[in-house]
Image (spheres, helix red, strand yellow):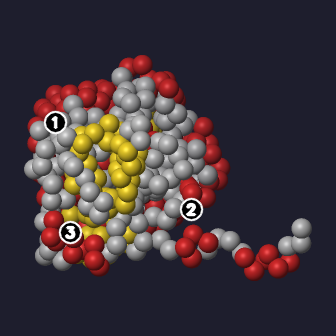
Amino acid sequence: MSEKRIPLSTGELASLTQQYPTPFHLYDEKGLRENARLLQRAFAWNPGFKEYYAVKAAPNPYLLTLLKAEGFGGDCSSLPEMVLCDKVGITGEDIIFTSNDTPAYEYAKAKELGAIINLDDLSHIAYLEEHVGLPELVCCRYNPGPLKGGNVIIGKPEEAKYGFTREQLFEGYRQLRDKGVKRFGLHTMVASNELEVDYFVETAQLLFDLVGELSAELGITFEFVNLGGGIGIPYRPEEEAVDLLLLGERMRALYERCIVKNGLAPLDIRLECGRMVSGPYGWLVSRVLHKKETYKNYVGLDACMANLMRPAMYGAYHHVTVAGKESAPCDYLCDVTGSLCENNDKFAIDRLLPQVEIGDLVIIHDAGAHGHSMGFNYNAKLRSAELLLRESGEVMQIRRAETMDDHFATLDFGGLKQFSV
Ligand SMILES: *Cc1c(COP(=O)(O)O)cnc(C)c1O
């Protein structure tokens, strides 16, 4: 079981909405930091361990600054994500650039920043060399194909667009070695929102074995393996969080057996988790605007899928509670909707909630990763503010809500004067 609560009382939340109108995203510094420390503790046995927070999960400079203070780097997949890291002092090899279908100017920026470049395809070796030049350190992304089962969000590895095949990896590292690259890493990411410890241990086994084979065949040394992100969180109250300390212990045993015994140590373990790091420590807070009872019951919020797209995008479950009614019986069957002109704009379908009233504050849980950042402007919906609950209890705004001027900023209305039709 995982408890679904927000670290503010109903009264505190209500007064917060006086200052910051709903909807908004709220993050909890204390929860974020404690969780970050737990992850560091789980892998403290590996001196070179580093978590590269997947910036796309919550690209906010204040959150990144907190995570940097806990020793995390940044995993980026676009130029603005790298620039964001650089702006908060996550620099050089504390950035890993794991992109795909990458334009040359993004590789150029990664090289300029001294970021670790993680190549997605064999053909990108020549592309990188031609357009940018090869850096001293290169990592390649492995796609194990049928050797590994996938899961819903990422899909089956052999149908995923990412990474090199096994044969291509041997060819790729050979080319890199022959072209003078000196330092090597190996990466994979085959799951998303996975809750089973075994899954990650098996993935690590796959990479550890491959490091052994590649090193033996090519006479190269690997500095790190990056297991990607994908550690899941218990979106449903009946699910259990991944036991990070157990995961760390299991990895340690495997490392002893596959890496230390085979003379491949030291090998740094790297992760790129986003969801597990911040997901449970963020909430989307909104208010009930309307109730509608037709063929079904609808609870209409002032938030919509522009604020949190996961339920509409992949039918993802997000737990929903009503502030002040946490212990009331859940006997009102309804769909919880937003205002977009799309019928999939629903945060929950056929959900049992307490008797909801117009004006109630509705809390959508586990919105701290892939929440605000997945927002968009379809239907000219504006993205909401982000707030941070500090450890001191103070709440600060870490991103203001979008305004109509922001939305129109890319349009030139003045040009209409010369536009004759
Ligand atoms: C999205 C992504 C991550 C983070 O995934 P989570 O499920 O948030 O842990 C890490 N690495 C890469 C390459 C990704 O695309």
Q: Which of the marked residues, 2 or 3, is nearer the chain's N terminus?
A: 3
- C-alpha gap between disc 1 and disc 2: 36 Å
Taking the image as shown, residue 380 lies to the left or right of residue 395, namely right
Asked whether 303 or 225 is in front, the reply is 303
- Determine which quarter of the picture holds residue 262: top left
Q: Which of the marked residues, 1 or 2, is nearer the chain's N terminus?
A: 1
Which structural element holds mark 1? loop
Taking the image as shown, residue 110 lies to the left or right of residue 253, namely right
Which structural element holds mark 2? helix
Read off the residue under disc 2. 380
At x 58% / y 44%, what residue is drawn? 101
User: Residue 172, image x and y in percent?
Assistant: 51, 34
Read off the residue under disc 3. 13
User: Residue 47, image x and y in percent?
Assistant: 18, 51
Q: Which quadrant, please, contains the C terminus?
A: bottom right
- C-alpha gap between disc 2 and disc 3: 28 Å
Q: Which of the marked residues, 3 or 1, is nearer the chain's N terminus?
A: 3
Label 3 vs label 1, nearer the camera: 3
Which structural element holds mark 3? helix
Numbered mark located on residue 238 in the image: 1
Other-residue count near label 3 (Cα within 10 Å), few / some / many at <14 / 14–19 / ≥20: some
